Image (tube, helix red, strand yellow):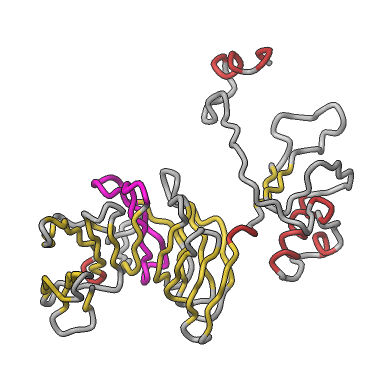
Amino acid sequence: MTNDGEGVQSLQLVDTRTDKVVQTLPYPSPESLYMGLAWSPDGRTAYASAAANSKIRVLSLANGRLTERGPIKLPTKTADGKAVTLFPAGLADTPDRKKLVIADQLGDAVTVTDTVGGPVQTVTAGHRPVWVTLSKDGRTAYVSNQGANTVDVVDVAGSAPRVRGQIKVGLHPNKSVLSPDGRRLYVANGDADSVSEVDLRDTVILVTEDEAQNGPDHVDAHRTLALAISPYTQTGKVDSTFYSTASMVRTIELIAGIGPLTRFDEYSTPMSASFTDKPNYRAYSVIKPTYPMNSINGAGVLARTPGGK
């Protein structure tokens, strides 16, 4: 338990079997604490935000007592040397215990750090991020933006975090919690006096190239691929509708409930025939690439391609 609003701030360890405080760790000024607390999945390590000190406290639990170790230090300067105060708030530890995801409230950012002292990676996020809830597999972080009405969807599975979208909720969202089955996110909206229920299964991902990177095909030099990934994607059917990049933009606008950006997308045909109103939530097996995805077109790649072409 963190007591960060006191004159002398403190962490307290509570025995949940007896509901009694068994240890108090005081932090007099200039040391600080904040709202962020997280336990590692094995229950042996605790993390606590020290917002005003630009660090995360790391504590080990042994024999019913907490002992503080060396902290995880956060950046205090930008890449170009300017001073920055990230002010870490909410925390979450990934299920594999390898990463800690941090909402940087004053930095308008999200930081992901290696729990064993690896690199610290920060990405720009929404306004005043305050809380982090992880998906069940730990690959996605849902970060509440207390200064707005959104929740950032952050991919934390790669080498660096990446904001891949936003979910609109009520005004000034703060804490959130995931349902036991991982399918729904519940967000408390502080100034809307409401709770938003977000169905995480209704995500749609649209992918296309900016141009036909491999050159013209046998039909048209303007053709390129497009992918629609969603439980509502139409399967077992050929859609012969002519779509353009503007069609994809128009589809996004209609799903998100926003107006057109230009006349081009306003009058484009949305990708309606690519979807159905009956979702398919069945599990599927991922087909993994059979050759390196980070290689350029060379002899090594051609040798792994059927026919070497």
Task: Please determine whether, in this image, residue 8 is positioned above or below residue 22.
Answer: below
| Numbered range of the magenta stretch | 95-120
Measured as percent of width and height from the top left, residue 201 is found at 61, 58
- Quadrant of res 247: bottom right
Task: Please determine whether, in this image, residue 175 is positioned above or below residue 305.
Answer: below
- Total marks shown come to 0
Residue 81 in the figure: left or right of residue 279: left
Q: Nearer the viewer, residue 257 or 213?
A: 257
Measured as percent of width and height from the top left, residue 216 is found at 79, 30
- Quadrant of res 131: bottom left
Q: Specify the quadrant that holds the C terminus.
A: top right
Q: Specify the quadrant that holds the N terminus.
A: bottom left
Measured as percent of width and height from the top left, residue 286 is found at 59, 36
Q: Nearer the viewer, residue 31 or 4?
A: 4
Name the residue at 66% across, 55% down: 204
Name the residue at 23% across, 72% down: 52
Residue 29 in the figure: left or right of residue 168: left
Measured as percent of width and height from the top left, residue 32 is found at 19, 73
Residue 223 in the figure: left or right of residue 73: right
Q: Is residue 96 magenta?
A: yes
- Quadrant of res 270: bottom right
Name the residue at 42% across, 73% down: 175
Tell which residue pokes out farthest to the front in this image. Answer: 17
Q: Nearer the viewer, residue 161 or 86?
A: 161
Name the residue at 46% across, 83% down: 190
